[in-house]
Image (cartoon, grey):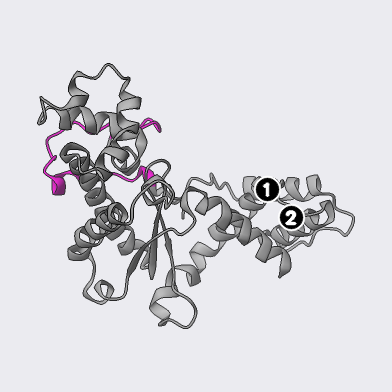
Amino acid sequence: MRGLTGAASACAFPLAPAAPPRHSRAMQTPLLKPAIHRWLAVSSLLLMAWPHSAPGQTAVLKQVAESLEPAKPKAQDKPEDARARIIQWDQEARDTLAGMEAGHMPVPLHLLGRGGDKPFPCGCGRDWGCVEAYTTLSGLPYLLAETLLKYPDHELTKSTATPKEKALSLRNRAQKGDPLAVEIFDFQARVMGLHVANLAMALDPGIFIIGGGLMDHEVTTPDFRDRYLRIVRETARPYLWAQQRDTLKIIPAALGELSQAIGAALVALYQSRG
């Protein structure tokens, strides 16, 4: 699935094959397989710069093309031919590649005490309160402006810095115990928790991996990350099915902000090896 961009992101995965069948159901569902294949294809096309030889890249693209349509690529196909084959197949399937844009699902604002508030705007153009606008850097200036009304004597109230500069300072402030910054990230964690529960209803994954800048081991403390994840788990738990509450794992990404790029590269690599 596609995650979020900015301060925090989430990816859902089934558990390993040794886990009970329930956890791998999302990946086994026939309707999802074409979408997964197309995601692999796009990942491969975006990763032409990986340290493989040109023949290796051609082999990857051929394998992806094989998974997309019955007709096998010809032995003499060049990378651009395989690329064209994938694009043609996708156009014929009328797939917009817009599925699982989870960051642009709406936030249940009524559960956060904001049912009557005007939703934050999102860069995608939607005005229904996208999750991305409430959990990432893009929405922090709006959240900060609202929260500052409760802290009229706060240093940032009088600051001449730009809204973005103020927002970028919040992560360090929260790690130093600044009440305003802590409140903001606690709120973002609650939004993420509700989003996790929402996605769990549709995907029934075994693991949610929370990544992005708030989970970056190089710039955040263990206490900061633990607090965020604890709130995510506590918020999600009441909205999960009983059988999910003790099996669903919500864990931090181990590779920081490069997690998604590294994962996409590994998928392409594993595909090339068969």
Q: Amino acid at mark 1?
A: Leu
Q: Which residue is mark 1?
A: 45
Q: For the point 23% across and 66% down, which residue is it?
A: 240
Is residue 115 found left or right of 247 in the rendered image?
left
Magenta span dominant secondary structure: loop
Vertical side of 177 occupied by 268: above or below: below
Q: Amino acid at mark 2?
A: Leu
Q: How many marks?
A: 2
- 122 in magenta: yes
Range drawn in magenta? 103-127
- 140 in magenta: no
Asked whether disc 2 touches disc 1, contact meaning CB atoms under 8 Å apart, the reply is yes
Query: What element does badge 1 sit on?
Result: helix
Tell me if I can see residue 112 in this picture.
yes
Residue 216 vs residue 9, the one in the foreground? 216
Q: Earlier in the sequence, mark 2 or mark 1?
A: 1
Q: Measured from the top left, where is residue 212 in percent x and y?
A: 42, 48
Q: For the point 20% across and 58% down, which residue is it?
A: 235
Q: For the point 80% across and 49% down, which residue is it?
A: 79
Q: Which numbered tag is attached to residue 61? A: 2
